[in-house]
Image (cartoon, rainbow, N blue to C red):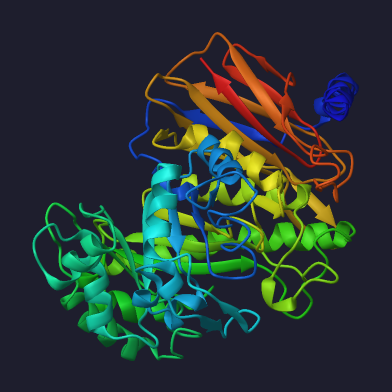
């Protein structure tokens, strides 16, 4: 609490001193067309991803019913409560690369009888399969979210995936439905979202796009809708800027798919760098790579538009986030990394981009939920810490199922050496109660940015705000100091005759609510 009060005081004291700078900053001009909203920001843009990787599942979510850590049927209560707070809408499982080596029947039935497996993708460790289909569905029910299951195409069979659909969703009498009942679940579950393989161009089989298009068509032919459950079939889409992959899938398999996945990580594969030890060059590089998400979505969407002008098929960004070197002393195969203010700004930028493109982007899943890559939660035995990225999801949850408000925005530049990027990222929505929510990120780690906003089609009389920032770009939360980076009340905005003005402190994420 003492650190939070110190942060609030620092931000409040800083704002008045920025007025002279604000008078010179005239480039950040925002127009919000509050009377032109037509598209809904699906709550599924705020989805999460949990793979059998490192301590995401075992230790992060599942500790078993005999654990001293408080659980509900072996699932950590603290993690469930934290994720319910940010209204997690869906959860992707069991991978990732792991999905194409996972055989679901190994993970059902009495736990003591389940065969152990070797996780050949991530660390070569042996897993006891105690977390399987029933445990995952229990986890989703505790979250109050929808399951998103990624089926095994790489090393699995059509029959295997078809039987998984039947096991989970069929209410009649059949071998798989009877097996589910024998394993303790009488009624079927509702499972809409199904990924037909993962990264077919890589760990999912090293396939050519033409070959995978045919494989996808074969698999989905035998994935049945057992009423009232209706499958939303997601194809393994492109890696980064592989526009030819999107072209092939839409041309050859477009009528058979409901969603096309896109994977893009903010990473320099030649030099990932440290998650916590970086300078402004490291900050700038990550911001620039994050902004590339906008170009990717727009160019893949352009390809999709040629074959699907009605936008029936959703673009599903089901793996996104930062990727750095693992923390010193940890297993390289576990992909455990810390999470700083830099990652919070990355999350804010990506979510603003997804909101803005909600007409085509229907789902997104940050990688990953707990203890892996850009995690929203870190755990260590009985301890749990919320990362700066978690707090961004908390600030942005107001956009879920709200109407996207079209904007026009001219941003000032953030320059470093001979390079430059937009200094500010923004998106806006209006919820069912008529409240307008505006989320803004200041990418500049040194300079504040004043944004002058005009509201068209409505007027407001009051507003409130919250901010996430810190004194250092490397600030992060640890198990010893879990509250170094957390939201605080924001008072750096004021109403004007035509809208509002907001002063964004450097390196900050701000959420405004206007009524």
Please give left or right for residue 194 compared with residue 51 in the image: left
Q: Residue at 78% across / 32% down in the picture?
A: 25
Q: From the viewer's side, name the closer residue of 87 and 108.
A: 108
The N terminus appears in which quarter of the rendering?
top right
Please give left or right for residue 65 compared with residue 430 in the image: right
Q: Quadrant of residue 58?
A: bottom right
Residue farthest left in this picture: 173
Q: Is residue 231 visible?
A: no
Q: Residue at 44% across / 34% down in the picture?
A: 405
Q: Residue at 84% across / 20% down in the picture?
A: 12
Relative to 499, is 226 above or below?
A: below
Q: Position of residue 46 (x, y in %)?
A: 49, 47
Please give left or right for residue 297 compared with residue 414 in the image: left
Relative to 237, is 441 above or below?
A: above
Please give left or right for residue 230 compared with residue 329 in the image: left
Q: From the viewer's side, name the closer residue of 244 and 125.
A: 125
Q: Position of residue 237 (x, y in %)?
A: 41, 74
Q: Quadrant of residue 367?
A: bottom right
Q: Residue at 41% across / 90% down in the picture?
A: 207
Q: Position of residue 273 (x, y in %)?
A: 82, 70
């Amino acid at each position: 609490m003492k650190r939070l009060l110190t942060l609030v005081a620092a931000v409040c004291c800083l704002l008045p001193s920025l007025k002279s700078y604000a008078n010179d900053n005239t480039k950040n001009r925002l127009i919000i067309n509050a009377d032109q909203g037509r598209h809904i920001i699906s709550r599924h843009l705020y989805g999460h991803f949990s793979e059998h990787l490192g301590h995401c599942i075992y230790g992060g979510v599942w500790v078993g019913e005999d654990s001293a850590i408080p659980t509900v049927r072996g699932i950590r209560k603290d993690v469930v409560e934290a994720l319910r707070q940010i209204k997690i809408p869906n959860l992707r499982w069991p991978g990732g690369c792991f999905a194409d080596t996972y055989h679901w029947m190994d993970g059902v039935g009495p736990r003591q009888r389940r065969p152990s497996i070797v996780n050949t993708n991530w660390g070569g460790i042996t897993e006891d399969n105690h977390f399987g289909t029933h445990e995952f569905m229990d986890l989703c029910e505790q979250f109050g979210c929808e399951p998103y299951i990624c089926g095994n195409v790489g090393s699995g069979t059509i029959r295997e995936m078809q039987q998984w659909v039947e096991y989970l969703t069929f209410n009649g009498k059949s071998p798989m439905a009877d097996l589910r009942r024998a394993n303790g679940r009488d009624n079927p579950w509702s499972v809409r979202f199904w990924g037909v393989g993962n990264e077919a161009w890589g760990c999912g089989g090293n396939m050519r796009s033409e070959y995978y298009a045919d494989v996808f068509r074969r698999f989905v032919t035998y994935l049945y809708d057992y009423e009232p459950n209706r499958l939303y079939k997601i194809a393994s889409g492109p890696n980064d800027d592989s526009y030819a992959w999107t072209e092939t899938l839409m041309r050859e398999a477009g009528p058979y798919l409901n969603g096309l996945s896109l994977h893009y990580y903010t990473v320099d594969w030649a030099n990932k760098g440290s998650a916590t030890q970086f300078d402004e060059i490291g900050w700038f590089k990550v911001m620039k790579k994050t902004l590339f998400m906008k170009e990717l979505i727009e160019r893949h969407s352009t390809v999709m538009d040629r074959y699907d002008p009605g936008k029936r098929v959703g673009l599903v960004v089901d793996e996104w986030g930062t990727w750095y070197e693992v923390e010193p002393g940890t297993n390289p195969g576990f992909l455990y990394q810390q999470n700083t203010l830099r990652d919070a700004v990355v999350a804010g930028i990506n979510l603003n981009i997804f909101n803005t493109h909600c007409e085509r982007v229907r789902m997104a899943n940050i990688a990953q939920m707990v203890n892996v890559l850009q995690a929203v939660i870190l755990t260590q035995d009985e301890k749990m810490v919320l990362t700066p990225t978690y707090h961004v999801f908390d600030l942005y949850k107001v956009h879920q199922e709200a109407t996207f408000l079209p904007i026009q925005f001219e941003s000032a530049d953030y320059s470093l050496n001979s390079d430059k990027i937009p200094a500010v990222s923004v998106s806006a929505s209006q919820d069912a109660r008529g409240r307008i929510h505006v989320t803004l990120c200041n990418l500049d780690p040194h300079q504040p940015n004043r944004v002058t906003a005009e509201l068209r089609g409505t007027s407001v009389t009051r507003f409130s705000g919250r901010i996430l920032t810190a004194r250092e770009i490397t600030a992060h939360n640890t198990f010893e100091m879990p509250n170094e980076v957390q939201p605080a009340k924001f008072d750096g905005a004021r109403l004007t005759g035509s809208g509002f003005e907001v002063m964004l402190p450097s390196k900050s994420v701000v959420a405004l609510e206007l009524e």
